[in-house]
Amino acid sequence: MTGPLLEVRGLRKSFPGVCALDGVELSIQAGEIVGLLGENGAGKSTLVKILAGVHRADAGEIVFHGRHGRCAGFASIQDAQAAGLTLIFQELNNCRNLSPLDNLFLGREIRRPRSPFLDYRAMRARATELFEDLGIHVDLDVDLNRLSIAVQQMIEIAKALLTDVKLLVMDEPTSSLTDKETDRLFKAIRELKQRGTAVIFISHKLGEVFAITERIVVLRDGRNAGEIDSRTGTMAELITAMVGRELAASAPRRPTEIGPEILRVEGLSGPPHVEDVSFTLHQGEILGLAGLIGAGRTETARLLIGAERRTRGRVLLDGKELEIKSPRDAVAHGIAYVPEDRKVQALILAMSVRENLTLAIHRSLRWLRIFLSRRKEAAITDSYIAELRIKVSSREQVVNHLSGGNQQKVVLARWLATRPRILILDEPTRGIDVAVKAEVHRIISELAAQGVAILLISSELPEILALSSRVLVMDSGRVKRVLERGDATQETIMSAALLASQAAPSLG
Amino acid sequence: MDNEVDRRRGGPRAAARAALGHTIRRRESAILLALFVIMAVIGSVEPNFVTGSNLYLVSRQISFVAIVALGELFVILHGGIDLSVGSIMALAGMVAGFCMKADVPPALAVALGTSAGLAMGAVNGALISFARIAPFIVTLGMLSFASGVVLGLTKGWPITEIPPSFLPVAQGAFLGLPIPVWITLAMAVVAHVVLTATAFGRRIYAIGGNEQATFLSGIDVRRIKFGLYLISAGCASIAGIVLVARFNSAQADTGKGWELDAIAAVVIGGASLSGGSGSVLGVLIGACIMGVIKNGLVLMRVSSYWQTAIIGVIIVLAVVLDRARRRGPG
């Protein structure tokens, strides 16, 4: 084929109150892997959603595979897919109650000739073949919600391969994957390239983008902000293009005094698979909790705050054993948990910044014991908006309309407002852009400096390494190693995390 | 956005202007307008509609549904549903009527009747919040159970001989408005304050918006849910007991089908059945729209069989229009 596979010219799109895209250009060749980067709100998601037929552009031109779409692009996702352009959403769209097999063929079921009945044998054969091509083993018959996000992601890719896909767009595919899982994904992406499929890869993990892509297109404020060759370009160039200014490399942790032990966890066990987890946490300490997805880190946190009932083990605060039966007890004891999935587990999307921010501190805002003081709510909200530099049009703005980074700040503010002594952060920078990420890191360091004890769960090793004074490595629900700051490196952490996993190479 | 800035600066006139703008933009104003249009249409076709005596009767009729709907609102806000309100009305009315007939002082009889209703609400609440059974199932069972108890105990016969001193509760008037209307307004004010100004109210909306997030924020979700089914049963009980005064007897089939009218009023009033949105004002307007249309159809001599069909169309139409409006600009 001559000419580019995809040619986008002068694309514009406005939403009420925001100009999301302001004349974006993009050109992609067949079999090319292109990174699409930019801060949150730069227009990446809008661009790919227009390409995939989710939104219609206001102006501009999209030519795909020689087909002159009207200026607005494809009319629907089905249209785009039929033409060979598939978008894998950041939030995976699948039916969690159905099996991988059913999900794979949803909408493209193979029927027996001239009958309405499904041909399971044919579908099974095709699925097995597909997953063999991708080099992974997937149990086709379990419920999808029992599989890891990584496997679900692979199923999405396999789904795209079922169609004659020419351009695959992946929005933050690795945000919840561990390094090992990411490697598998990259292998699959390179496999796609061999078949001549082009891939647009969106990610906030800059190292990965350099590793997998051939060139990187940067957007800023809805416009093209430069293009970087992945082989010759540098991280610094990329960041400068994204934020439009020089950014200090992620702030190293200020050395702080680590105080006395305040939390001691002994032999914590409980559902679904946490076994005998013990550790201590000191005042002003940041304890990193590393491990692969499914290693039991989030589950440990949930047991600690009483979201799940522990079957064994003790939790001691200042040497006194705590009875924590629900998150309510945890909050009362000054233990705060910022969950990993802010939209599902933390935010009430239809509520305002104020209402979300004050959700955990109603007790201190009451007058006459039952009424909430709007004045106090407003004062607290405004102080955190200023302190954490949350970008909102007003404290009454509905959080659904905020960018990921600002949403995360609202969640952080909710918990900081409870004045916690112990703060558990679960993937605090997932899916937020570099500038806000640096801010969040700064906030975490400052909190530790103020004496808050922090348990930091993260799948990003650089984040763990930059912030933690000690690192706990978990695997299969158990603590495998405790590494002191000096001993913790990407290699030591990964080898500890992988020791047991090597026995079971399948991703499930 | 300018309004917001003004409001934060605190200029009183700016604040008033912002508040006015806020009121006009509220979703309730659209259905209030719809109510006025409906009333104007009915009034022009059937002049009898706007006579004082008719409006008096209509307002009283609406107030009974509105009381039940207020309780239903609390349950719907958290994302649940209460199908048993009609049966609980009958049970509470029957207990109160039975006590009065046995010469228990009316005030105590009302308390006993309400307690009977609350007990049913407690069963609903316990099964839903602690045993985690779906609200639809639990309250469907209660709908059948409570009405069966009433029919079994009374064998279908009404309880009469209600003491005359109790009848003004439904049949009396104060300042030209029927007493049940005053009861409704008083309950509505309390409900509105609870929902908008208290931590409890905020938490109900929070649970409806995202239950998991509310739980992880250290809020006792189960206790709140339990309370909501008590509130719903309490409101239904009051409506059932006031209806005893209205009919001068406790009827075994009181409240039959009222759960649907109550849910319809809440939904027409703009609440989402998935929880998290809805208001007291909306419920009151929703109940008025239902009551006015029913009355208009009676005045226009539409057969009662056709009336239910028309009400069905109105319920669905109201929700369709609300969706369209929300998807539209703003």
Image: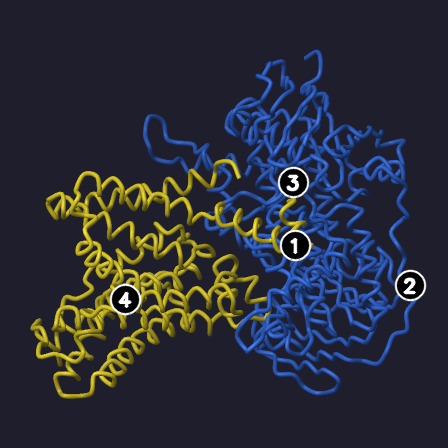
Q: Name the chain letter of the residue that bears numbered label 2.
A: A
Q: Is residue B73 visible in this depiction of the protein?
A: yes
How far across and down, in percent of the image, does residue A413 sit? 70, 62
Q: Which residue is denoted by mark 1 in the rendering?
A: B11
Q: Secondary structure at mark 4?
A: loop
Q: Which residue is denoted by mark 3 in the rendering?
A: A135
Dot 1 or dot 4: first in sequence order is: 1
Residue type at the position of mark 2: Arg
Residue drawn at (66%, 69%) of the image: A300
Chain letter, colour yellow in render? B
Q: CA distance from mark 3 to mark 4?
A: 81 Å
Q: Which residue is denoted by mark 4 in the rendering?
A: B175
Q: CA distance from mark 3 to mark 1?
A: 66 Å
* In this picture, residue B184 sits left or right of residue A192: left
Out of B185 and B289, give the one closest to the viewer.
B185
Q: Name the chain letter of the residue that bears numbered label 3.
A: A
- On whether disc 1 and disc 4 are found on a single subunit, the reply is yes
* In this picture, residue A198 sits left or right of residue A367: right
Q: CA distance from mark 4 to mark 2?
A: 72 Å
Front position among marks 3 and 1: 1
> Up-down: is B174 above or below A387?
below
Residue type at the position of mark 3: Gly
Residue type at the position of mark 1: Gly
Q: Which mark is residue A254?
A: 2
Q: Name the chain letter of the residue that bears numbered label 4.
A: B
